[in-house]
Image (spheres, grey):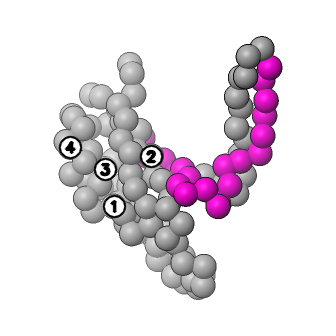
Amino acid sequence: MPQFLVVLRDSGAFPDDISAEEIQAIIQKYGEWIQTMGGRGEKLRDGEGRIVLRENDRVTVTDGPYAESKEIVGGYVVVEAESYDAVVRHCHAAPHLEYGSIEIRQIEQ
């Protein structure tokens, strides 16, 4: 069965003044949603990472991505499904749609 990468992109809509209990409830919603797809997901660490670019013969490494960016990848899920349409149907119920967008890509096998 094909595998898909479900990329969770944050738009900066996540509230700053949220309590620990509210965060736990949101994490539980994500976990339940991921379980309905039979996938495995990971949250990426906020505010850190590296960007590697080649410019001519020189490779540069910079810190990033930055939360100030318009849209950053906040996490991902790997799921097996019959088709893009099947994954899209699961994404209709994604709690993430309150905070950003979702990109779906099939993994080449």
Residue wearing tag 1: 94
**Amino acid type assigned to the residue bearing label 2 in the image:** Val
How far, Cα to Cα, is label 2 from label 3?
Answer: 14 Å
Secondary structure of residue under mark 3: helix
Q: Residue at x 44, y 67 (%)?
A: 99
**Crowding near pointer 2: few (<14 within 10 Å), some, many (20+)?**
some
**Amino acid type assigned to the residue bearing label 3 in the image:** Met
Residue wearing tag 4: 86
Label 2 vs 3, first from the N-terminus: 2
Secondary structure of residue under mark 1: loop
Question: Which range of residues does the magenta coloring cover?
Answer: 58-78
- Any mark on residue 37, and which? 3
- Viewer-nearest of discs 1 and 3: 1
Q: Residue at x 60, y 84 (%)?
A: 17
Does the image show residue 103? yes
**Crowding near pointer 1: few (<14 within 10 Å), some, many (20+)?**
some
- Viewer-nearest of discs 4 and 3: 4
How far, Cα to Cα, is label 1 from label 3?
Answer: 10 Å
